[in-house]
Image (cartoon, rainbow, N blue to C red):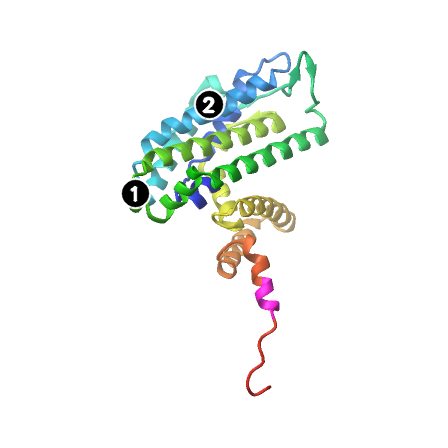
Amino acid sequence: LQLLVGVTGLVSLGHAAFFGTAAYAVTTLAPAGEAGNGWWLLAAAVGSAALLALVIGLLVVRTQAVYFIMVTLALAQLVYFVAHDSPWFGGSDGAYLYFKPVFAIGGRPLFDLDQPAVFYGFTLGCTALTVAVLMLVLRSRFGHALVGIRHNEQRMRAAGFATQGYKLAAFVLAGALAGLAGFLYAVRSGYVNPEILAWHPSGNALVMVILGGLGSLPGAVIGAVAFVLLTEAFQALTPHWQLLLGGFIILIVALLPHGLVGLPALVARLCKPRPPTPASQ
């Protein structure tokens, strides 16, 4: 989502559609009586999310500003109701993944995802791979073009860039990475329901990006970690934890316009000794 919002300037409220589609792909395609092939299920999850992003992207990249937000939200809600009302996906009851998939080479499993520490390491590796891919993208000509589109799309078109094609490519890449997250969610939880396709997870992801700092990959990671930890802490304090979380986010936005990633710069500026005034000299 940082690639869309912070880099390209496309504020989406439908990112959970790709996340949930991938999770449903895992539970739908996995065999019911045995562990599925992890390589195949991972490819199917990421591929289904990317395909959905391509279809939705073709419809939304021609819109801008608030219209882009509303169209992505509307199409994501359409995906939600398809999963909610379709018996093939379990309807409102959701679907289960009874066995964690197995990643094997030559018939030998590489690791056991049933072990919490192993699954944590696998998830951490996927996160590192995602950040590395996005870093390479942002350093490329493609990434610089996305930044240019965010600043002035009209000027980029005048310079000869096919801006709609660039935005569509960013949209599909962002959807595919959301599909990777959906795969991990389905494997961890063993259960998916239509609520993961609703607009609330999309809103939470957008808050994470804003909380960490728009346009910063470290900010996206910091924002996600901070959001989850704050949610857990406030839930332990009071049943009205949303009030505390909302107040904290407002405070961060007011004091740190660049998000939590800008906190070290703020502290350094506050701790920097002031030059002596003429009177003290």
Residue drawn at (53%, 21%) of the image: 43
Q: Secondary structure at mark 2?
A: helix
- Mark 2 residue crowding within 10 angstroms, few (<14) / some (14–19) / many (20+): many
Residue positioned most to the left: 158
From the top left corner, tell me how far across and down residue 110 is, in percent.
69, 20
**SS assignment at label 1:** loop
Dot 2 amino acid type: Ser
Assign the magenta stretch its main secondary structure.
Answer: helix
Residue 230 appears at what percent x and percent y? 60, 49
Query: Which range of residues does the magenta coloring cover?
Result: 267-272
Q: Residue at x 66, y 16 (%)?
A: 104
Tag 2 near tag 1, CB within 8 Å = no
Q: Is residue 157 left or right of residue 35?
A: left
> Which quadrant holds residue 63?
top left
Residue 93 visible to an observer of this rendering: no
Quarter holding the C terminus is bottom right
- Residue 43 can be seen, yes or no: yes
Q: Which mark is residue 139?
A: none
Query: Disc 2 versus disc 1: distance between alpha carbons?
Result: 34 Å
The residue to which callout 1 is attached is: 159
From the viewer's perspective, tell me whether residue 39 is left or right of residue 200: right
- Residue at figure coordinates x 54%, y 56% from the top left: 262
Q: Which amino acid type is shown beneath numbered disc 1?
A: Ala
Q: How dense is the environment of label 1, judged by Cα within 10 Å: few (below 14), some, or many (20 and up)?
A: few
Give the camera-side residue of 245 and 144.
144
Is 66 on the left or on the right of 269, as rendered?
A: left
Image location (x, y in percent) of residue 85: 43, 23
Q: Is residue 264 above or below residue 10?
A: below
Considering only order in the chain, which callout, 1 or 2, is on the residue closer to the N terminus? 2
Q: Residue beneath label 2, please?
A: 48
